[in-house]
Amino acid sequence: MNELAPISREDRVEKLKGLGHSRKRVEDVRFTQGKGNYVDDLKLPSMLYGDFVRSPYAHARVTSIDKSAALALPGVVAVLTAEDLAPLNLHWMPTLAGDKQMVLADGKVLFQGQEVAFVVANDRYVAADAVDLVVVEYEELPVVTDPFKALEPDAPVLREDLAGQTSGAHGERRHHNHIFLWEVGDKQATEEVIASAEVVAEEMVYYHRTHPCPLETCGCVASMDAVNGKLTIHGTFQAPHVVRTVASLLSGIEEHKIRVISPDIGGGFGNKVGVYPGYVCAIVASIVTGKPVKWIEDRMENLTATAFARDYWMKGRIAATKDGRITALSCHVTADHGAFDACADPTKFPAGFFSIVTGSYDIPVAYVGVDGVYTNKAPGGVAYRCSFRVTEAAYLIERMIEVLAIELGMDAAEVRAKNFIRKDQFPYQSALGWEYDSGDYHTAWNKALKAVGYEDLRREQAERVEAFKRGETRKLIGIGLTHFTEIVGAGPVKNCDILGMGMFDSCEIRIHPTGSAIARLGTISQGQGHATTFAQILASEIGLPADSITIEEGDTDTAPYGLGTYGSRSTPVAGAATAMAGRKIRAKAQMIAAYLLEVHDGDLEWDVDRFVVKGAPERFKTMAEIAYASYNQAIPGLEPGLEAVSYYDPPNMTYPFGAYVCVMEIDVDTGVADIRQFYALDDCGTRINPMIIEGQVHGGLTEAFAIAMGQEIAYDEIGNVKNATLMDFFLPTAWETPHYVTDFTETPSPHHPIGAKGVGESPNVGGVPAFSNAVHDAFRVFGLKQAHMPHDHWRIWKIAHDLGLHG
Amino acid sequence: MIPAAFEYHRPSDIASALATLREFGDEARVVAGGHSLIPMMKLRMASIGHLIDLQDIADLKGIRIDGNTVRIGAMVTQQELIDDAALTRAAPLLRETALQIADPQVRAVGTIGGNVANGDPGNDMPAVMQCLDATFTLTGPSGTRDVKARDFYEAAYVTARADEEILTAVSFTVSGGGHAYEKQKRKIGDYATAAAAVMLQKDGTACSAASIAMTNLSDVPVWSKAAADALVGTACNPADIGSAVAAALADISPTADNRGPVEFKRHVAGVIIRRAIERAWSRA
Ligand SMILES: Cc1cc2nc3c(=O)[nH]c(=O)nc-3n(C[C@H](O)[C@H](O)[C@H](O)COP(=O)(O)OP(=O)(O)OC[C@H]3O[C@@H](n4cnc5c(N)ncnc54)[C@H](O)[C@@H]3O)c2cc1C
């Protein structure tokens, strides 16, 4: 091989399609042809179908359940209720947040859409008909959907099962509907600074309840093989290994007898992290019937019963000097968790990483307190395209900066620039205990303001206001600014775990004799393009083309244990494991090359795809040659084969950041807002695949747009969900989606093997405040300080109306 | 989202469709594009034992333009309305409206007959038909009769059509002049927060004829004679338009929903009606 005409180094790099290459997504070949394989595509012989009887009431006692008519319907195999699950102790299950949750209504229901009975039939249509035949009698109880009212002394008792329990998984409970108070920071010092501050801005900022609404809803197929006692669960799981462990703990089946498979997943966004009653019921039904049981949610069930996101009432207070230096931040949150605390957060963090709330700013002292509260709403509180509660934190601080700017009479861009953590302060210790790994905020900020022509925009905005006042136009311009800092890549095992499982991740690589490879990871793609990007990381590490590397995830029988994909953790954690495993491969390859070239290891150096003898560039062995040799030569002192595995425990989180600017035209008479311009600068450290990054940013911004401008799960006073279909739940189409301009700076993470930080969630974290700030900014001159999202037509109209702009 | 069981019938002429309707009475319903009816069945808000699919009935298809008269078969889809160049020349209001209904997928199957027969106050075509003073042709066991669009709607989902009748066509006379269909919605595929159809004719500098109808601002489409009267004979100056808007607003009674409260809807309706009048006038 060595005799072939040498190809240039650049050509060899290009051929690998490694780091920095906009390689096309290998997944898209099957997705764009409709050849994906989702859980609902799975059809097993003699498979049964499960469907739920759900509560129409938000709070009621279940006085009786009559299954007889349903059981009489031909094709119905079983109807399970809490009574049937109780002997197995499966009528309740633990949540990821240290609470417990009913699998099927045990005496009462606590939210509309709660699972009451599980019908199993030999046909999906029969199951749906049988659901209508189960007769449930309810006795309505008083409903509370407002977390503040839930904490009033005489509020109805929701969780009777917790009667007398004055403490829970996260400490003291001070009221029957109180879950926890989580505090971080120095409360007293913060209060002192605020009390004597020159300027204080105070605001209640509500981040409303919404829902991740992945295109594919949740579902599974549980299949108990009665002969060998092995349970296989195919499902929409963002964390298949965790599901296996939980299934084993709950069922008592040994873990090696459980196989969890996540096939193609049609989006997760946090909605598919938790364990749902549907999974438990399908597993039990399969064990009982000895047949595979499929359960797939419909859209309304997904929106009303599986995990929601946000619902944080955040009372912020920010103190500053007269010239705009922030001196303290305090935030108290009333967190509405619904009927059960089923947040998906690392165990020790009941409010996730909300304490990243000091954002991009050097704030000397801060305090955060979060009160978790039960209400008659669906459980959840998941990280919808964000690291745990980071969107909430970013929204609060980016709103508080704007409110402070109003208080100071300063431009909000200037307030930010004045308070950014400086480049020379990294690694930076935040007042709330985080160590920010790296950043260069001023560079990013200045680049963003320059790119959008910030001063010209402000001038145009001021002219528009004058024209508006003269009656020449009914449209205002809003300029929404955001500089966000995320905290992703959970996380170091010393403080991050889920149900006791440390939040490391893993990669196992096998190099085949002819120079191709397979790598398996503990994560699972839900559309992020792992099969594309992880192969690129590996290509750069081991010098085999990305096109020759298969990435496999999601089968617990074959993949190494990992904590799954959410919270932008795949690249920071599993990506690091991939690089580290690749380095182990390379280390062995170096010894093989040394043997083949008859030199000492130390005489070799790595060059793109080969080891070269130092000072003798014509003497080398390519990785493909080495791979072959590892299988066909007896090399003294070395085992045959070329494989490696790495379990990576990250030393720290990563801290991606970005600067976003949104320009909006707002019609004050109709409340219609048009996004005229959206500029997004993201710094995610080392950029693995710029095209995938751009796609992730577009997707995340579109979800942010939805959340800020219309998407919500709202309840009426008696606990009915008001927007349980896509007619009312805003999911933007290509038509509504704004045009985005993306940009970047590149500040690698110093502790990550390749310097990558993760990007999938940044645009949602930064996008929501950018859109929302634009709405607020349009009305700033007329005296608006704070208006709650979502900014749909009527709420924008109401802002204008309340400010007297309708004459 | 699974409907209750039903029988499916697919007649190839009107007579057998009517016979099947009659045979199963209350249990039967015709289905056209299915894009209003099937969602209701999937939500189990409608349970229908016998679905009679009209798509094989040739007599219900086609657009005919005879001089000033336009006749559109009930099974003509919204997409066909958009694509028909002759229809667009004769009555551009229809294309402008159809383009604001739902999304291309829905428009490819949703029919004009289904849209006007459905009786949902959110449907856009009923107000347009009232604006055009269209006539609906109904065929039942005892023959065929015509009902004016302006007389057809009685309450939400309640129309002048008897259960055993099929709506076979809509027809109207082309009047020329300026037109506009203005609609505010939250997103593609949404029903109107407020919408208005306007036709205006101009004689010299004055408005010689006017017709104004509104969508989703009451439990039925609203044709406002008073609003039209306010414009006829005027030059459609801002004050004249203001009077027309005030008259139109007096004829509606919107209800609160997820789009917003009544106060907001009335305000938006005023803006939308005004814009529709201005646009129609600019084209007259
Ligand atoms: C996502 C989505 C968005 C939509 N957005 C809009 C919108 O913005 N504006 C709008 O106007 N519509 C909208 N629609 C409704 C759509 O336009 C429907 O297609 C239309 O309302 C009904 O037409 P159809 O042919 O589908 O009727 P079907 O659903 O088949 O029938 C509707 C009703 O009319 C009856 N019917 C149908 N044809 C006849 C007939 N010839 N004689 C007697 N009775 C008949 C049926 O029995 C049924 O009761 C939307 C639908 C969807 C799914």
Image: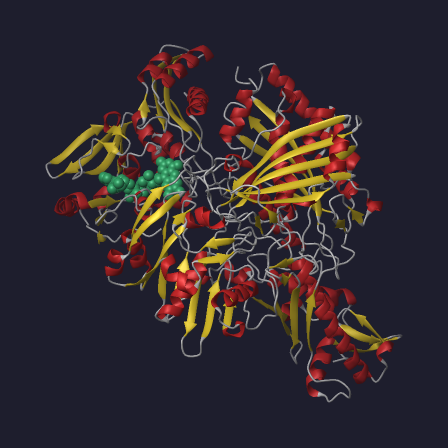
Q: Quadrant of residue A509?
A: bottom right
Q: Give whichever of A14, A657 is nearer the camera.
A: A657
Q: Quadrant of residue A450?
A: top right
For residue B128, side relative to residue A682 (left or right)? left
Colouring: secondary structure
Q: Give whichever of A405, A514 is nearer the camera.
A: A405
For residue B119, side relative to residue A380 (left or right)? left
For residue A629, side relative to residue B229 (left or right)? right
Q: Quadrant of residue B159?
A: top left
Q: Is residue A5 visible?
A: no
Residue A647, placed above or below residue B151: below
Residue, far front: A164
Residue, far left: B142
Residue A702, placed above or below residue A83: above
Residue A501 position in % (x across, y down): 62, 63
Q: Give the image quadrant in which the ligand numbered 1 is located.
A: top left
Q: Is residue A287 visible?
A: yes
Report the quarter where the N terminus of chain A lies: bottom right
Residue A352 position in % (x across, y down): 63, 49
Q: Give whichever of A22, A733 is nearer the camera.
A: A733
Residue A251, placed above or below residue A478: below
Task: Give the residue at x 64% y 28%.
Answer: A777
Residue A693, placed above or below residue A75: above
Residue A350 position in % (x across, y down): 61, 49
Task: Give the residue at x 34% y 30%.
Answer: B90
Residue B47 position in % (x across, y down): 25, 46
